[in-house]
Image (cartoon, grey):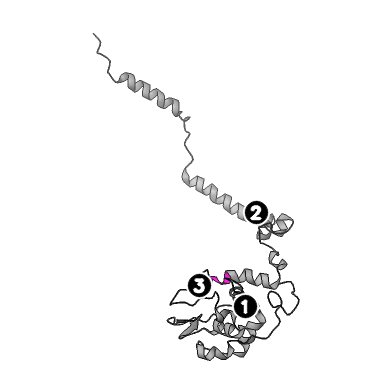
Amino acid sequence: MSAPAHPDSTDLDRLHSAVKREKADLPPESQPAPLWAVFLLMLVAIIAGGQLGPMAGGWSFDVSNPFSVVSSGGGDPRPGAGDAGAALDPFALAMKKGASGYAVCGGCHQGNGGGIPGQFPPLAGSEWVNGGTERLVRVVQHGLVGAITVKGQGYNTPGGMQAFGAAMSSQDLANVLTYIRNNWGNEGTMVTKEMVQKIRDEEKRATQWTEAELKPFADKNVPGEITAGPGATAAAAPAK
């Protein structure tokens, strides 16, 4: 009498058959390519590409850049790129760039120009901003320290306002001053690069101003042509 079949033999046969169907046996003496050979081929391809690149004319950002004039056959298609700023008059361009430069001031004076009560004075409606441009230029150029009064309120910021003359160019300072003099309800003549540079050249101060020291300049304007905007004294020329 033959021995009974193992109860799992049918399942094992079925499992082996499934494995054979999913993964075919490799032919005799056939093995997968070793990893070191794959890496070697990749290395050769990289080196060959580096050698062929210069032979084919090399790589140039101006040529390969999809936004460049060379590759696109025309101007830069991105909004606000290229010579878009050249179409603005000096006042409009100063306002546009001054809005970006104001970021260094906004932490204290806030985005709305309202300042922080008891800590940082407001710029909106401030007699310091709307008054003479000479006092204003001197403040941003050299800084301000000690107690001051703005719109009838007293302020005495610890350490005072820092000087920005060493950190910003005359043009950058002019843009920011033009921006704050014509924002949040303020309306004043623009401050030009030449005006700021005039104070730079005349005043070689190394310390911050005090309110008392600046009083003689409160209503004085730095002389110079106002090329555009409120109170323009000269015909506007294309901005550069």
Mark found first going from the N terminus, 2 or 3: 2
Q: Nearer the viewer, residue 203 or 1?
A: 203
Q: Which mark is residue 174?
A: 1
Q: Secondary structure at mark 3?
A: loop
Mark 3 residue type: Gly
Q: Nearer the viewer, residue 151 or 233?
A: 151
For the residues labelled 1 and 3, the Cα–Cα distance comes to 21 Å
Q: Which mark is residue 91?
A: none
Outermost residue on the front side: it is: 152
Query: Would you name the residue on which mark 3 appears?
Result: 114
Image quarter hosting the C terminus: bottom right
Q: In the image, residue 214 lies at what x, y percent?
A: 54, 89
| Residue 222 figure quarter | bottom right
**Is 110 left or right of 13, judged from the image as shown?**
right
Q: Nearer the viewer, residue 34 or 138?
A: 138
Mark found first going from the N terminus, 1 or 3: 3
Q: Nearer the viewer, residue 52 or 113?
A: 113
Q: In the image, residue 45 lies at what x, y percent?
A: 58, 49
Q: In the image, residue 131 lies at what x, y percent?
A: 59, 82
Task: Decide if residue 77 is in sight here.
Answer: yes
Query: Would you name the residue on which mark 2 appears?
Result: 52
Chain part drawn in magenta:
100-109
Circles 2, 1 touching at the beta carbon (< 8 Å): no
